[in-house]
C-alpha cells in the first residue's frame, strides 16, 4: 500500500497549533471535511468514539487517529506536525507531535487495516520520524511520507 494513494500534498500541515487532544481532533475533522466533503461533526464524532476505545497515541510522539465512515468513498489520510507536543493519552505517556489521520469507508475491511499497518511501519522508522520532525515545510513532509513508501516496497 502506497501512502501517496492515501494522502495528497494538500493533506499535509507542517505547524499546527493546538493545546489539547480534543483541539487536534477538531482541527483534523475540519480539514478532513474540507478534503472529503463529509460533515465535520460526523468525522469528529467518529474519531471521538474511536478514542473512547483507547488512545490512538501509539508511542514515541506519534498518534494515528482513525475511523470508518459510511459516506466516505475511499481511504483518506491527513498528516499534521504540531508546533508543540501535546498530551494525547499515548500508551507510553509521552506527548505527541506527529499525527496521521486515517479515514476509511465502512466497506474498506482489510484495506483499512493494511493502510493502518503501512502508516504504523513508517512512523516506527527512526530515520523517517526524524525527517518528519525536522522538515521545514509541507512539501518536505509530503516527500518524506511518500518517499519512505517507495524505499520500503523494494
Image (spheres, helix red, strand yellow):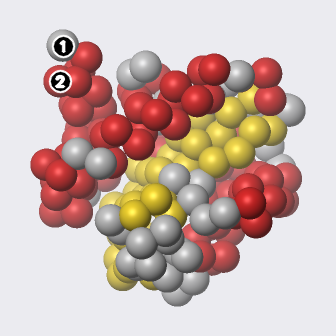
Q: Dot 1: few (<14), some (14–19), or many (≥20) neighbours within 10 Å?
A: few
Residue 16 spot, x, y in % from top left: 44, 70
Question: Is residue 136 at least partly visible in the picture?
Answer: no
Checking the image for residue 154, the label placed there is 1
Q: Residue furthest top?
A: 154
Query: Mark 2 packing: few (<14 Cα in 10 Å), some, or many (20+)?
Result: few
Name the residue nearer the viewer: 132 or 93.
Answer: 93
Name the side, left or right, on which 130 lies relative to 22. Answer: left
Going 46% across and 34% down the picture, which residue do you hit? 117
Callout 1 secondary element: loop
- Quick check: 40 above or below 82? above
77 is higher (above) or lower (below) than 15:
above
Task: Identify the secondary structure beneath mark 2.
Answer: helix
Q: Quadrant of residue 48?
A: bottom right
Tag 2 residue: 151
Q: Position of residue 70 (x, y in %)?
A: 86, 32
Q: Are marks 2 and 1 in contact (CB under 8 Å)?
A: yes
Q: Position of residue 23 (x, y in %)?
A: 62, 77
Image quadrant containing the N terminus: top left
| Rendered residue at 68%/68% (across/down) | 26
Q: x and y percent of residue 143 in the render? A: 24, 38
The relative height of residue 28 versus residue 24 in the rendered view (above or below) is above
Amino acid at each position: 500500500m502506497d501512502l501517496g494513494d492515501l494522502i495528497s500534498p494538500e493533506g499535509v500541515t507542517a505547524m499546527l497549533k493546538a493545546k489539547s487532544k480534543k483541539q487536534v481532533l477538531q482541527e483534523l475533522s475540519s480539514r478532513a471535511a474540507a478534503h472529503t466533503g463529509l460533515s465535520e461533526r460526523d468525522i469528529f464524532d467518529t474519531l471521538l468514539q474511536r478514542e473512547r476505545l483507547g488512545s490512538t497515541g501509539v508511542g514515541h510522539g506519534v498518534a494515528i487517529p482513525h475511523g470508518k465512515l459510511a459516506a466516505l468513498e475511499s481511504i483518506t489520510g491527513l498528516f499534521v506536525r504540531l508546533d508543540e507536543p501535546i498530551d494525547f493519552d499515548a500508551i507510553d505517556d509521552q506527548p505527541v507531535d506527529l499525527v496521521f489521520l486515517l479515514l476509511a469507508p465502512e466497506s474498506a475491511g482489510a484495506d483499512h487495516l493494511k493502510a493502518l499497518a503501512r502508516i504504523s511501519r513508517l512512523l516506527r522508522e527512526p530515520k523517517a520520524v526524524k525527517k518528519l520532525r525536522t522538515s521545514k515545510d509541507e512539501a518536505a513532509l509530503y516527500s518524506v511520507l511518500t518517499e519512505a513508501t517507495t524505499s520500503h516496497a523494494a
